[in-house]
Amino acid sequence: VHAGGRDCSAAQLLHVLAKCLHLVCVFKCSEALELLADLPAAHYRTGWVLCLVGRAHFELVNYSEAERAFGAALAAEPHRLAGHELHSTLLWHVRAESRLCALAQHALAVDRRSAHAWAILGNCFSLQKEHSTALKFLKRAIQLAPELAYAHTLCGHEFAANEDFDKALAAYRQAILIDERHYNAWYGLGSIYFRQEQYDLSEAHLSRALQLNPRSSPLQCYLGMALHEKALAEGEPPHRALEVLNRAIELDANNPLARFQRARVLLSLNEQSVALEELLALRELAPKEGAVHLMLGRVYKRMNDPQKALVSLSTALDLNPKDAQVIKSAIHKLDAADDDDVEDEM
């Protein structure tokens, strides 16, 4: 065989593949992709390698490249379903309902006794917000492969969506018992404690997730959110939250949630001018996000610019009619003394 521009034995090739797998498992995904790119075409175009490429791009939040790699893996080996549960999560994230349905149909047609197929189907119904049905299929995946940690984590997400927090916590803990390096489950625990306003516990579990995957911009963002709420609850300035959110943006400048939460923190620190700059940049990144316009309106109000505040709030009302009551209340308060609500959600 040929790899890295030279002839090598099968053992050397396996060594390269094992090193790439290890790099992805410790989330050094860019390094793994560089090594994988040096593989000879005959090996690179296999389902296993292409799924690993897709996984690496997924962890780097390069969703278009990840989907391309997963699609190539499916074309190369249509009967190989292992790894495509992550493919289905990718499609869930980009809200590609028709492509996710097609993947689920294909998976069941290939092997109805595959745990990966039922996990894919669970994600498909989750995207349609049919969480109870999704849980039924994910439990079938667990029945077929009790050692599949990701299926337990997906169950935890569905329990959380149904606000059944005790069962969600149990599912995440079971995933960690199977694989203590499964950062998704540590994140799940942190998110539940965040929703329960147990910010110390949220911080601890999100920090553990970040120990495992320190290059994750989304994890840095969620930790920043927990630290912000903890600081507000304790009446302290949220400087640590700002540091963490800055790191999240350094890792991914196009992470809209991190930039939005950074603006919230800056507003809590009475840094209206910097918050305004952040929100204006975010408006270019996500022009149809009503929460951005709502917070812009509140920033303009604090800066004594009621005309721009009204324009922003009116835009927020057009984009988010379901939040009409909150937005109209903000409009009515434009002439009132400043209120301290920065609790918008993106």
Image: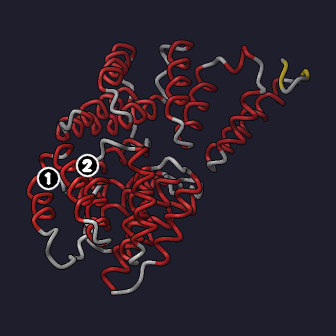
The residue drawn where x is 14% and y is 75% is 336
Give x and y (percent) for residue 57: 57, 36
Give x and y (percent) for residue 313: 21, 55
Quarter of the image holding residue 259? bottom left
**Vertical placement of 273 versus 187: above or below?**
below
Disc 2 crowd rating (10 Å Cα; few below 14, some 14-19, many 20+) is: many
> Which mark is on residue 290?
2
Say which element carries label 2: helix
Considering every residue shown, the one lying at the far right of the view is 6
Say which element carries label 1: helix
The residue drawn where x is 16% and y is 68% is 334
Whether label 2 touches label 1, CB < 8 Å = yes
Residue 268 seen from this side: yes
Residue 186 seen from this side: no
Amino acid type, label 2: Gly
> Which mark is on residue 323?
1
